[in-house]
Image: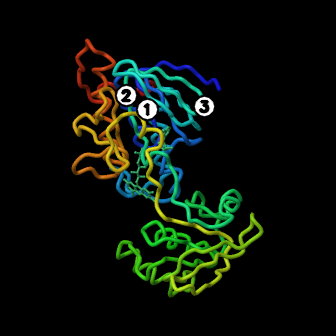
Amino acid sequence: MSGATISTDVVIIGAGPTGLFAAFQCSMLKINCLLVDALDEIGGQCVALYPEKPIYDIPACPAIEGAQLIEKLAEQIEPFAIEKLLGRRVESLSGQSGAFHLVTSKGDTIEAKAVIIAAGAGAFGPNRPPLDGLTDYETSGAVRYSVRRKADFEGKSLVIAGGGDSAIDWALSLSHVAKKIYLVHRRDKFRAAPESLHQLEEAIARGVVEKITPYQLSGLQGDGATLSGVEVATLAGEKRVLEAEHLLAFFGLATDLGPIAQWGIDQTRSTIPVVPSTCQTSMPGVFAIGDIASYPGKLKLILQGFSEAAMASHAIYAIVNPNQALHFEYSTSKGVPGAA
Ligand code: FAD
């Protein structure tokens, strides 16, 4: 397997919101960078898990959908023509500060002076229910773990499984397009914001949503591609079949650092501890930002990842330019290429 051979100042592992903003920050400091992501498109969780959901806590954006935020971040880095390697995971990291060597799952080799790990939940993937024939229905799109287009569920009967915010939020949001939603949870109580629970009661009163508790998923019915029903059962063995064309399961994200766990960097519970002022990890020259980075008081919020991207990029300047002091300048003074 032979891929590209690329030499750059900084390799950014992960093209989610924080990786994209790190690319902007590096570029503003005239640090060359390369973005690598395991997924086929940029955007991380925002695009893969909630492209049409509005985010309300991005500064200066009263409401912006996940995919729209990523479009804006992509637009912000466009003037810098940053190279991206998508659809490939970074598998290995060796070397030291100033001279790192990385290899991707497609055989690309990358030489970089510093590394920013913006890998979110690491090897990205939803927790999947242990059901027979699941993979076939995942392939056909009958079973899903995220909603990319609400219109896909127009007039359909759905089973939504899960007891947290995502399950409730999607039940509420899809209650305006779907014909019927069965909300399955193994406990009677849901873990969601009081306002969401109040809205859920209203959706139940409208007859669109039906609570199926305390039940767990136990099987799938259909021809292996088209789903006709979802089997559920109580712990006591009481069974029901819910007529549905789709199962949407929201059991959280599997947090596994994947290959990153083998790189010799200190880790705590699937996160990488960093020095908060620089975001440097236990390995000099390797920085971590966004959901994967941890320190006391850390909030797993996009806005915090943006700030970490700025701090890491400024700290990296000294590695890329060892004999040059960084003269701090506002973006209003520096401008960006092509701006008036
Ligand atoms: P991610 O978005 O997780 O991106 C990481 C990327 O790294 C992925 O694309 C992955 O494929 C890639 N990657 C991982 N390992 C490798 C590897 N070895 N090689 C190559 N690529 C790799 N946050 C808010 O601030 N406000 C909200 O309202 C909000 N709502 C949310 C709603 C939902 C339903 C969810 C799931 C999350 C929400 N979040 C919200 C959280 C927010 O999406 C995350 O904090 C944010 O996406 C983290 O960004 P990131 O760039 O650190 O990581």
Residue at image mark 1 = 12
The residue under label 2 is 26
- Observer-nearest residue: 201 or 291? 291
Residue underneath mark 3? 106
- The spot of residue 166 in percent (x, y) is 46, 66
Of the residues shown, which amino acid type is indicated by label 2?
Cys
Q: Which x, y percent locates residue 143?
A: 63, 64
- What secondary structure is marked by label 1? strand
Q: Secondary structure at mark 3?
A: loop
Distance between the alpha carbons at the discs numbered 2 and 3:
25 Å
Q: Residues within 10 Å of mark 3 (few under 14, many from 20)?
A: some
Pointers 2 and 1 in contact (C-beta within 8 Å): yes
Q: Amino acid at mark 3?
A: Lys
Residue at 43% of width from left, 78% of height from top?
Answer: 199
- Quadrant hosting residue 128: bottom right
Image spot of residue 148 (x, y percent): 58, 57
Q: Relative to 248, does residue 327 appear above or below in the rendering? A: above
Above or below, 30 relative to 304 = above
Residue 301 disc label: none
Q: Quadrant of the C terminus?
A: top left
> At 25% across and 14% down in the image, what residue appears?
324
Relative to residue 91, is residue 18 drawn left or right?
Answer: left
